[in-house]
Amino acid sequence: MTETGTPQLNAAELLQELLSPAGRADPFPLYAAAHRLGPVLPMSDDIFLVVGYGAANDVLRSPSFEIPTEPSSRPSLDLMQRSILRTNPPDHGRMRSLIGQVFTPRRVAGLQPTVEAAVDELLDALPAEVDFMDRFAFQLPVTVICELLGVPTADRHRFRPLASDLTAALELTDTADEAADAAAAELGEYFTHLIRNPPAGGLVSALVAARDADDDRLSDEELLANLILLLVAGFETTTDLLGNGLAILLDQPDQLTDPAAFVEEVLRYDSPVQVTTRVARDTVDVAGTSIPAGSNLVLLLGAANRDPARFTDPDRFDPLRTGNKPLSFGAGAHICLGNSLARLEATVAFTHLRAATITRTGEPTRRNRLVLRGYQTLPVTIRPGRLAGYFTTDPLQQASDNTTR
Ligand code: HEM
């Protein structure tokens, strides 16, 4: 045992523990144990765990590492393999530049009024007792991404279970099952119909127009895969960011002074994406470890965000830390295309939530995932307010806070 009570494990044991129910629920002591072993941990001759911030950052930015693209017999994985998330040069650059032409910073900035209106509307419609995940954390990003894509908002209730089933395919264990394949089929059918009848003004019609302008730039299958990726990536992770942030706030009510800095620290402290993977194209040295060409790398982004060599007192939630640049959106060629949209949504949401009175009413439940980290349920009462407010987990504390502010 170490002085912190975590047994000293080797890299393979660490990964095994991380994948256990206890490890998924609370991976952070295991990340701390990993940092004591070093930034890059060999699990075998050709499998490496990357836990150091500098090492993970270097791997993400280096052209010597690519997305693993082994063919899959599972339709759910096959679908994702055709999107920009799972492709390499030259296909990745071709698709990313095309999508980047329609999903522009200006379009994202133009969504601010939509986001503000959606937050207001959702908060106004909340019943006194509510599952925050269901009634807010999911609703906000799904509303915004449907608006951006031009997906009819009436259909949005269908997407939470479908996205959850589909993204099970991204977990490191073999959780991609029939449900994931069925979700891929249903989303495929839905978007095929939408591509044939694109609603005016959204990204669906913009991408259909881009495909029609030049057949070589985006195949029909790629168009479909990328639209589904944008929908699913557009709300699942943002839902988790909102839930992870609210849970922190309920425990540490004084931390929300600057909403943008608060969101950045939530991203670092409890990242909605904890893991990604790469394969080495060349033999490369990373943080002093030689990685042979063909090796598989498991990048623990959530661990990199808690690297004591990069962040002072990494297990402390501190929105005031300077130079906070978590790796939660990745880095390099695949850096999250939606990072400014996710930041916008979360910052607007927490700006409004700051004025509300929020009380925990029951035990939250975590989703049983390692790669995508979030809550399944988060029961609270919310009383929206227009003035600077306070948060508490204890009504008595709430009352006393009220008299001192
Ligand atoms: C808190 C919210 C989000 C988090 C934590 C997140 C995280 C990530 C990460 C880590 C990657 C890179 C994966 C890798 O390099 O292997 C990524 C890629 C991507 N994200 Fe996000 N994301 C979020 C929100 C969004 C939103 C709102 C959208 C779209 C509207 C989006 C669209 C994408 C796309 C299209 C990619 C693929 C980019 C590429 O491979 O070139 N994400 N995201």
Image: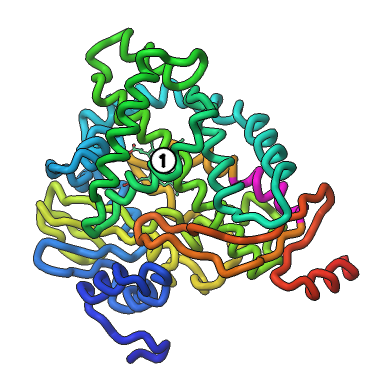
Q: Colour scheme used in the picture?
A: rainbow
Question: Would you say residue 49 is visible in this rendering?
Answer: yes
Nearer-the-camera pick, 276 or 198: 198
Quadrant (top left, top right, bottom left, bottom right) of the N terminus: bottom left
Nearer-the-camera pick, 347 or 187: 187
Q: Judge left or right: residue 334 versus residue 262.
A: left
Q: Judge left or right: residue 155 versus residue 94.
A: right
Q: Residue at x 42, y 48 (%)?
A: 329
Please identify the residue farthest to the top as the structure is shown: 213
Measured as percent of width and height from the top left, residue 123 is found at: 71, 45
Mark 1: which secondary structure? helix
Q: Residue at x 36, y 18 (%)?
A: 195
Quadrant (top left, top right, bottom left, bottom right) of the C terminus: bottom right
Q: Judge left or right: residue 42 versus residue 229.
A: left
Under mark 1, the amino acid is Ala
Question: Would you say residue 320 is visible in this rendering?
Answer: no
Report the magenta residues as a range.
346-356
Q: Confirm whether the magenta stretch covers residue 351.
A: yes
Indicate whether 82 appears above or below 382: above
Nearer-the-camera pick, 162 or 386: 162
Nearer-the-camera pick, 17 or 303: 17
Q: Quadrant of ligand 1?
A: top left
Q: Residue at x 25, y 12 (%)?
A: 215
Indicate whether 6 appears above or below 170: below
Measured as percent of width and height from the top left, residue 155 is found at: 49, 30
- Cβ(mark 1) to ligand 1 < 8 Å? yes
Q: Confirm whether the magenta stretch covers residue 347.
A: yes
Measured as percent of width and height from the top left, residue 283 is found at: 12, 54
Kindly indicate the quadrant of the structure image that contains residue 29: bottom left
> Mark 1 highlights which residue?
233
Q: Residue at x 40, y 39 (%)?
A: 232
Predominant SS along the magenta part: helix
